[in-house]
Amino acid sequence: MLAQREIAAQIEAFVKGLETQWGASREAVRQRTPGEIQREDDRALVYAHTWLDHGVVTGYEFQQDLLVRGEFRLLQRPVNGLNEFIDYYLAVKEHLTLAFGPPDEDHTTWHNDLYQPLPDYWGIAVQLGHLRYAATWTTPGGVLMLDLSGHHHCRLTLEYRSAAFADPGRAV
């Protein structure tokens, strides 16, 4: 339960940081963001670190040197529990629902129902790409998308696009 609260708090801090920096320059974001840059190009800054042995990637996208989009991605390495990332997703979703109200869209999608009758193994279904969770909120600052999907491991991704600046076709 502590880990779920901790990841929800980290994502909340990421969202609040983006909201205060929409339209900021790359240099301003670089100065406010701790950690080592893993990748930088004309449109993006990408940072990487670990949390509870999992990989964390945070990315910032710029248009005309203005911050327009952020992404927080948690990668499952190693597997500490079969439904660990489902628990993280649900904790973050609950946190975002308290902050922004119910999601505009909320989907649980089975691409292969092999594990559907076995809830204790749904985390395996996510890892295999058989199950995906997704929720979207429209906020005063933009559009928040929370996604739990997988392909050999789970990925919990929060993407936040600025309402004022974002180009919906780009990805960090």
Image (tube, rainbow, N blue to C red):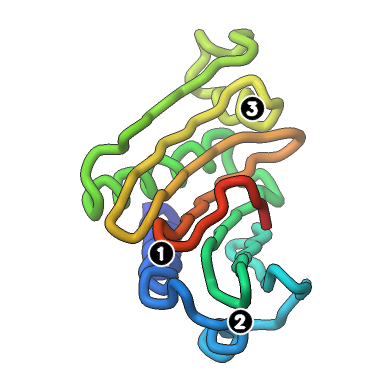
- Locate residue 76, reporting x and y percent: 66, 48
Q: Is residue 130 visible?
A: yes
Which numbered disc, 3 or 1, marks the residue closer to the eye? 1
Residue at numbered disc 3: 124
Specify few, some or many for label 3: CA neighbours under 10 Å numbering under 14, 14-19, or 20 or more. many
Residue at numbered disc 1 = 15
SS class, disc 2 = helix
Q: Amino acid at mark 2?
A: Arg
Frontmost of labels 2 and 1 is 2
Examine the rendered structure and indicate whether residue 32 appears above or below residue 122. Answer: below
Q: Secondary structure at mark 1?
A: helix
User: How far apart are labels 3 and 1 at the CA level?
Assistant: 28 Å
Residue 8: quadrant of the picture:
bottom left
- x, y (%) of residue 48? 69, 69
Q: Reading the chain from its start, which is encountered first: label 2 or label 1?
A: 1
Residue 116, image x, y percentages: 53, 12
Q: Is 157 on the left or on the right of 145, as rendered?
A: right
Amino acid type at mark 3: Ile
Looking at the image, is mark 2 or mark 3 nearer the viewer?
2
Q: In the image, what residue occupies the spot 62% across and 73% down?
A: 64
